[in-house]
Structures are given as structure tokens and as C-alpha cells.
Image (spheres, rainbow, N blue to C red):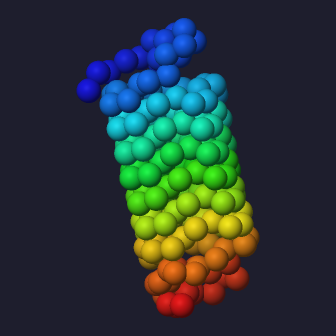
Amino acid sequence: MLKISAEDLLAKYDSGIRDFSHTDLSQINLFEAYLPEINLQGSDLTGSNLAYATLSRSNLTGTNLNQAQLEKTWLDSTLLADSKLKEASLIGAELAFAQLIRADLTHADLQNANLQQANLSAAHLIGTNLSGANMEQCNLSQSILIRSNFFRASFVDFSGTEIHPTTILPNGYPGSSQ
């Protein structure tokens, strides 16, 4: 995997290059970077800072974003299927229409995130904080929900999902299988 710096990535992006798939970008600082429609498929962004960045309509399929800082990041209509987002901070992130199929969001923080019409089918939501999230028409079917927090999340539809008793429902009560 080729490792490149933030400066090199931004310069190449500004010159019209969009394909940075299978690139080592671990620990990179792209705070407030404007990178819509970038291809980071299979890249390593472990521990990176992408807070307030714009990655709308991008391809992050199979990307490692473990422990990444993604607060208030625009990830709307982004492909994140099979991505690793363990312990990632997505507080207030814009994830409307995002595809998070089979994504691992174990211990991720999505407090107040917008997940309207996002697809989280078969996602791992273990110890995940989704309190206050907008989940209108969000697909959670076949997701793993253990010790997740949905307190005050809006429009949550648990259809096709088994809710572990340790999961906190939007009303603050513990869950049970539906």
C-alpha cells in the first residue's frame, strides 16, 4: 500500500485525480478538506482526522476508518459497505443515503448523526452510540444490535432486526427481540 501525505493527496485531488484506492492514509490530517467523489476504496485511514471534511458521493468501500475523527463530516450518498469504523467518532456526521452495508461500527459514536435513508443492513452496531440520530427510513435489517444506544434517536425502524436486551431504545428503555 502506497503511503502519501495530506499535501500530496490534496495537490493530486486539485489536479483532477480522484482515485486513491488502496492507499495508506493512516493518521492523516484532512480537517475541513473538500474531497467529494473521491475513491478511497480499500484504503487505510486508521486514526485519521477528517472532521468537518466533505466526502459526499465518495467510494469508501472496504476502507479502514478505525478510530478516525469524522465529526460533522459530510458522507452523504457515500459507499461505506464493508468498512471498518470501530471506535470512530461520527458525532453530527451527515450520512443521509450512505451505504453502510456490513460496516463494523463497534463502539463508534454517531450521536446526533443524520442517517436518513442510510442502509445499515447487516452492520455491526455493538456498543454503538446513536443517541439523538435522525434515522428516518434507515435500513437496519439483519444488523447486530448489542449494547447500542438509540436514546432519543428519531424515526427508528427495527424491522427485521433482533434487538439485544442490552440495547437502549429511543424511549430510554432496554430492548428486546422484535
Q: Residue at x 43, y 33 (%)?
A: 40
How many numbered callouts? 0
Residue 26 image position (x, y, % from top left): 37, 31
- Is 51 placed above or below 115 here? above
Q: Residue at x 60, y 38 (%)?
A: 57
Q: Residue at x 47, y 83 (%)?
A: 162
Q: Residue at x 61, y 30 (%)?
A: 36
Foreground residue among 29 and 77: 77
Residue 157 image position (x, y, % from top left): 64, 77
Residue 122 image position (x, y, % from top left): 43, 67
Q: Tell me which corner region of the image, top left, top right, bottom left or bottom right, holds residue 16.
A: top right
- Is 143 placed above or below 166 here? above
Foreground residue among 117 and 23: 117
Q: Tell me which corner region of the image, top left, top right, bottom left or bottom right, holds residue 63.
A: top left
- Is 111 placed above or below 153 here? above
Image quadrant where one finds the N terminus: top left
Q: Would residue 77 be visible to someone looking at this image?
A: yes
Q: Would residue 26 be visible to someone looking at this image?
A: no
Foreground residue among 163 and 167: 163
Residue 111 image position (x, y, % from top left): 64, 59
- Is 64 placed above or below 129 here? above
Image quadrant where one finds the C terminus: bottom right
